[in-house]
Image: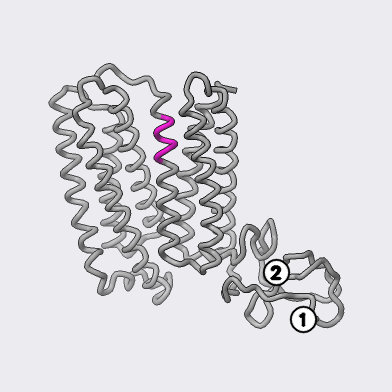
Amino acid sequence: MKKLYKPFLITSLVLVYLVIAAGSVVRMTGSGMGCPDWPKCFGYFIPPTERAQLDWKPNHFYKNGQVIIVDESLRVAATDFVSSLNYEESNWKPYTKHDYAIFNPTHTWIEFINRLLGALAGLATLILLITAFGKLKTDPIAPIGSAFVVLGMGFQGWLGKTVVDSNLLPFKITIHMGMALLIVLVLIYLLSREQKTEAQYNYITRFQGLAVIAIILSLIQIGMGTQVRQYVDGQMHQYNLTQASQWLLNPPSLFYFHRSFSILVLLVHAYWGYLFIKTNHIPSVFKGIVILVGLEILTGIWMAYFDFPFSSQPLHLVLASLLFGAQSFLLFIIKGKS
């Protein structure tokens, strides 16, 4: 069982990153309310594929909790029953969490895949916790950290429900993202404890402070990015997906600050790289960090100057999350060798 710990640790981390990517696609396409209820989708475990499935039908068996759309509002079956020839309001109760009742099959399945990935990630972290108990005597931090991750995934599931129930309140979406990064941080920490590092790391421990600064700058950038994203979401709903050239009309000052802040991030990493060069040893992780910083800046330029090409927004967010994870991994490795 103990041998399965590291494979499931890596699997959990990969799946959490896939959930972050899927969540970004959901937001980019405006699919957040593709499934207006939770945890089911229009009352189904496997969501409908066409609008007709959500129309009331005579002589049809309805299960308790199944959803239909009547007069542009959701109705939920109050119990199991077979419908008669005429619609009877007494068999149904209104859905009271919100008044969103639009069915778009593309949005529905994008949101469903996001939830499915979330469920798979939750299952992987649960198995991770089980395997971590095999390390209880040799490394008690492993089961403690794994337990935190499982609790965090449970909190994410609950938070996902509240996001849907609130009809996508922006601050709840931001908390959702913040919790995802915290889960990534814990998984990265657990993974760093499994790594056998090179001896050269012994003489770069003085870079701990610089690593912390780089992580803080990345978190500030991600925080500002979520706020800019909220503005873009509003523009997207106003001008729809076909008018991306209008999304950055009269942007808030935060957009310009967010854009210029990337220069500071680049300079800090350039200085960090200079110090590594002076030690005649550049860790492989840092090389990856440099690539991620460059790609993050390029995708930002891609979005701003080329009218948000498809996939540019989720790619920008995933790169930021990967950068945060790589920076954290390097910090934990350096700190572990001090």
Q: From the viewer's perspective, is the residue at label 2 or at label 1 nearer?
A: 1
Is 211 magenta? The answer is no
Based on the displayed image, in which of its 4 quarters is residue 125 positioned? top right
Q: Residues within 10 Å of mark 1 (few under 14, many from 20)?
A: few
Based on the displayed image, in which of its 4 quarters is residue 238 positioned? bottom left
Q: Residue 143: x, y in percent? A: 52, 30
User: Residue at 51% across / 64% down in the picture?
Assistant: 31
Q: Which residue is mark 2?
A: 67
* Badge 1 amino acid: Glu
Separation (CA) of disc 2 from disc 1: 13 Å
Is 189 magenta? The answer is yes
Q: Is residue 227 above or below residue 191?
A: below
Nearest to N terminus: mark 2 or mark 1: 2
Q: Residue 233: x, y in percent? A: 39, 68
User: Residue at 72% across / 69% down in the picture?
Assistant: 53
Q: Is residue 289 above or below residue 34?
A: above
Q: What span is in magenta?
A: 185-191
Q: Could you tell me which secondary element the residue under label 1 belongs to?
A: helix
User: Residue at 40% across / 26% down in the picture?
Assistant: 193
Q: Which mark is residue 89?
A: 1
Provide the major secondary structure of the magenta segment. helix
Q: Which mark is residue 225?
A: none
Q: Residues within 10 Å of mark 2 (few under 14, many from 20)?
A: many
Coloured how?
A: one colour
Q: Residue 8: x, y in percent? A: 54, 31
Q: How many marks?
A: 2
* Badge 2 amino acid: Val
Q: Are marks 2 and 1 in contact (CB under 8 Å)?
A: no
